């Protein structure tokens, strides 16, 4: 087995992982950093983020306002100390990206342009056309190439963490191109593996977003926090779930039901704003959870349209005109033409909610540290406490940068101080993994990986969707247990070594099932409605701060089931208040008049 | 949904001496992409390997040859190939397994041209860059690194040392950026024998580019810069000021 000694291992080559690797390399050029990714870094899912990255930028904006929007947007479940740190460091990180060459869109005077985004009171979202994630990822990837300290392990799949007495010691990976097992040893490990949207059937996520890092941590006793909060993006394409960015609404796009009516005004987001005059925190610029819930209500009322068997509403951009669309939303024009054969300048785009983002993740403190020494987690795989019950669009790209930097620097500090752990300490763990892998190959009689995976994604869609109830979730949990039993009987039918994608899909499904189980168990435990977690059971339809101003903390038990504990939310300056949008929020109207 | 036949080039280095085409039945309607079809086949035969991820033509993973033309699988639809359809791995790269090719040469070329902003000034404020200055390089910054242009390039096919369309376009992108001061460091790569002058301006790279980056135009403009640079260096070395 190939064995390599590094100082830091970063698992995941997306925005967070790259930012962390660069930060570590800047601490000391002699630090050995392994950037391990199951795909080439520029394929990572950060690439698909469209809208932008938030930071207080203009003179009429304030850190206090960004803090307020984020905490209120989270339905008061964000940790306020974390939000404070985040809004303070957001701007400098976006400037850093600019200094590295990110092609941010500009105003005519050459300063950075900001756009409106849902749930944000002021324009503070930096963007690079509608390919912001793409440009951030490529800027970071290209910048990373200038640091010899960063050694890439592209297309290496991590199947286990090496942990000795609550100290991380490295990772065990499979080299996809040869099937070899590789032992990478290090003093710090940063998990930056992205979310788990693929455990749901309809989602905006890339195929690689399978919850790997969350499950790796969970299996070693690290808690996953706030897993019940899964964001449905209100505007995905029907069927495929391909993302149609919120920036469409920031630019003035409107949502219509089958009768051409702007239905959001019926759900506490009105009054209707005039066409071409989008207003922050009103109507289409309400937060994502509210908009996705409104779709569900319209569907129940029979007011949604149909696109090839999928219930849809319509995103109307026609009034923006072809020129503006091509300049500001070029990718959206391409996607609409390619995937639903619609020219947005001429026809409204059929859209529907699709799972987009996992708010919860590996529990960390504000320094991105987990409960295992030397193990850090950042980005969508982590729960640093920023998003609470609902993430605001354009906070997560900034999160990758702010906390990527923190983790990279902390991991470098840890690595410089610590001694490595003796190799003998994890010899048994590796031998077990090798034996388990060898036992996987075989033939399936009447079951298949695809059948189990589809079973999981449909169970999650039905049981843990936009609205949830006890009965549906219990059924979902039972199904997940059955699927898990079937999973343990499954064999990998491709016995090859080279690029064995059947093996990787098998391992990903195992990770996905673990994560799905924590989502469902956490959702069952929260018997209130908050943010993206809405329950239809009697007496659970509203927020209940008396009992539930707390994070769920999901831990794997000895028998493989999930135990739920509770952790109070950090409240520093903003006591829980009502979360109101549109005219219902009097501060909107009052401040607008001032 | 109607049933139809497609051909896929298969190659398992652990069993096969050389690649061969196999025929598969898939269900297709107007929205079925080449990637969708490959996924259907993989459900029948899990040993089929190919790269994919985003499904929306931005991650650059799923480049393949579709009837001998480089395409992104996710952005190419069966409806446009009513007669026969054969999917094979990207040309001009070594085949590793089935539709997976060795992308390392591509990554090496990309790294070689120093694709990062070269400017040692330390500052905590953004540069000023007007929309006009942005527009000069923006198109060349849209490359998704899919490698289709390398499959299309006859010169890269003949000489794998050629830096190739995407790398040269990326060098040009940074050279055109008003914030960058690194052109002098990049020009030796462009001037070198495997740089811009290897290109014979066939232009197929730009035709197949799924993001309209137009690497051929970047290389052509790169040739002008290279010519200027070389003339200047002749003057400098002969002491002419």
Image (cartoon, rainbow, N blue to C red):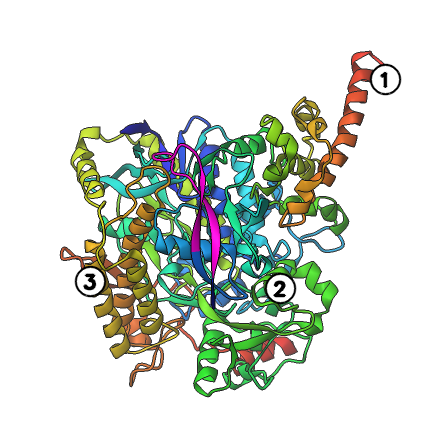
* Numbered tag placed on residue B241 in the rendering: 1
Residue B9 among magenta residues: yes
Quadrant for the C terminus of chain A, please: bottom right
Q: Residue at x 39, y 60 (%)?
A: A197
Mark in front: 2 vs 3: 2
Label pair 1/3, CB-CB below 8 angstroms: no
Quadrant for the N terminus of chain A, please: top left
Q: Are labels 2 and 3 assigned to the same chain?
A: yes
Name the chain under label 1: B
How many residues crowd around disc 3 within 10 Å: few (fewer than 14), some, or many (20 or more)? Answer: some
Query: Residue beneath label 3, please?
Result: A563
Label pair 2/3, CB-CB below 8 angstroms: no
Element class at badge 1: loop
Query: Residue beneath label 2, please?
Result: A337
Name the chain under label 3: A
Residue A586: percent from the left, percent from the top? 54, 81
Residue A50 among magenta residues: no
How many residues crowd around disc 2 within 10 Å: few (fewer than 14), some, or many (20 or more)? Answer: some
Horizontal relation, residue B179 to residue A425: left or right: right
Range drawn in magenta: B4-24
């Amino acid at each position: 087995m190939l064995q390599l000694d590094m100082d830091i291992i970063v698992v995941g080559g997306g925005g967070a992982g790259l930012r962390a690797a660069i930060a570590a390399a800047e601490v000391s050029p002699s630090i050995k950093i392994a950037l391990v990714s199951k795909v080439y870094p520029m394929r990572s899912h950060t690439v698909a983020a469209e809208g932008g990255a938030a930071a207080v930028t203009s003179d009429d904006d304030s850190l206090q306002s960004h803090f307020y929007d984020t905490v209120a947007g989270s339905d008061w479940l964000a940790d306020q100390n974390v939000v404070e740190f985040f809004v303070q460091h957001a701007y400098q990180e976006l400037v850093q990206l600019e200094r590295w060459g990110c092609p941010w869109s500009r105003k005519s005077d050459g300063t950075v342009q900001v756009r409106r985004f849902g749930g944000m009171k002021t324009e503070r979202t930096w963007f690079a056309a509608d390919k912001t994630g793409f440009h951030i990822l490529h800027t970071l990837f290209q910048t990373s190439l200038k640091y010899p300290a960063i050694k890439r392990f592209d297309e290496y799949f991590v199947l286990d963490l090496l942990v000795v007495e609550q100290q991380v010691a490295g990772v065990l990976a499979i080299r996809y191109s040869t099937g070899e097992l590789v032992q990478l040893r290090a003093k710090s490990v940063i998990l930056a593996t992205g979310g788990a949207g693929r455990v749901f059937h309809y989602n905006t996520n890339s195929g690689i977003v399978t919850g790997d890092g969350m499950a790796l941590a969970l299996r070693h006793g690290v808690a996953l926090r706030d897993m019940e909060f899964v964001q449905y993006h209100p505007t995905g394409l029907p069927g495929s779930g391909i993302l149609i960015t919120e920036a469409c609404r920031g630019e003035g796009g409107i949502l219509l039901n089958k009768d051409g009516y702007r239905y959001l005004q019926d759900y506490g987001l009105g009054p209707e704003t005039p066409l071409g005059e989008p207003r922050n925190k009103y109507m289409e610029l309400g937060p994502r959870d509210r908009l996705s819930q409104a779709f569900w209500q319209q569907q129940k009322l029979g007011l949604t349209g149909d696109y090839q068997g999928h219930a849809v509403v319509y995103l109307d951009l026609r009034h923006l005109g072809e020129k503006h669309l091509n300049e500001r939303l070029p990718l959206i024009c391409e996607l609409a033409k390619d995937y639903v054969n619609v020219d947005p300048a001429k026809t409204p785009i059929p859209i529907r909610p699709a799972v987009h983002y996992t708010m919860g993740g590996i529990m960390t403190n504000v320094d991105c540290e987990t409960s295992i020494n030397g193990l850090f987690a950042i980005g969508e795989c982590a729960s640093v406490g920023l998003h609470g019950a609902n993430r605001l669009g354009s906070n997560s790209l900034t999160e990758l940068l702010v906390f990527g930097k923190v983790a990279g620097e902390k991991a470098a500090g840890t690595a410089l101080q610590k001694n490595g752990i003796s190799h003998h300490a994890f010899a048994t763990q590796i031998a077990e993994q090798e034996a388990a892998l060898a036992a996987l190959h075989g033939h399936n009689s009447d079951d298949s990986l695809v059948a189990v995976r589809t079973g999981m994604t449909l169970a999650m869609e039905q049981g843990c969707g936009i609205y949830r109830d006890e009965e549906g979730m219990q059924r979902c949990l039972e199904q997940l247990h059955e699927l898990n039993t079937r999973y343990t009987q499954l064999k990998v039918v491709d016995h090859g070594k080279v690029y064995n994608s059947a093996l990787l899909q098998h391992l990903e499904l195992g990770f996905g099932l673990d994560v799905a189980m924590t989502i469902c168990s956490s959702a069952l435990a929260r018997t209130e409605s908050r943010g993206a977690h809405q329950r239809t059971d009697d007496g659970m339809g509203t927020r209940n701060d008396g009992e539930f101003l707390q994070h769920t903390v999901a831990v794997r038990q000895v028998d493989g089931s999930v135990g739920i504990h509770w952790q109070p939310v950090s409240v520093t300056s903003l006591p829980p208040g009502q979360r109101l949008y549109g005219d219902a929020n009097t501060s909107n109207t009052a401040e607008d008049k001032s | 949904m109607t049933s139809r036949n497609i051909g896929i080039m298969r190659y398992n280095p652990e069993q096969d001496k050389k690649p061969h085409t196999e025929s598969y039945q898939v269900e297709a309607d107007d929205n079925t992409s080449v990637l969708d079809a490959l996924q259907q086949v993989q459900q029948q035969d899990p040993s089929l390997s190919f790269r994919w991820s985003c499904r929306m033509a931005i991650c650059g993973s799923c480049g393949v040859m579709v009837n001998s033309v480089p395409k992104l699988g996710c952005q190419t639809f069966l409806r446009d190939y009513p007669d026969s359809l054969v999917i094979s791995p990207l040309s001009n790269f070594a085949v590793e397994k089935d539709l997976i090719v060795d992308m390392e040469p591509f990554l090496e070329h990309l790294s070689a041209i120093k694709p990062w902003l070269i400017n040692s000034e330390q500052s905590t404020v953004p540069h000023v860059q007007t929309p006009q200055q942005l527009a000069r390089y923006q198109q060349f910054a849209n490359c998704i690194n899919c490698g289709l242009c390398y499959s299309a390039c006859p010169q890269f096919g003949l000489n794998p040392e050629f830096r190739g369309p995407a790398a040269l376009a990326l060098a040009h992108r940074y050279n055109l950026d008003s914030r960058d001061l690194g052109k002098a460091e990049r020009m030796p790569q462009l001037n070198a024998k495997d740089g811009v002058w290897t290109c014979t301006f066939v232009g197929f790279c730009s035709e197949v580019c799924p993001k309209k980056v137009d690497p051929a135009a970047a290389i052509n403009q790169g040739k002008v810069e290279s010519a200027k640079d070389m003339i200047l260096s002749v003057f400098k070395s002969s002491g002419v000021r």
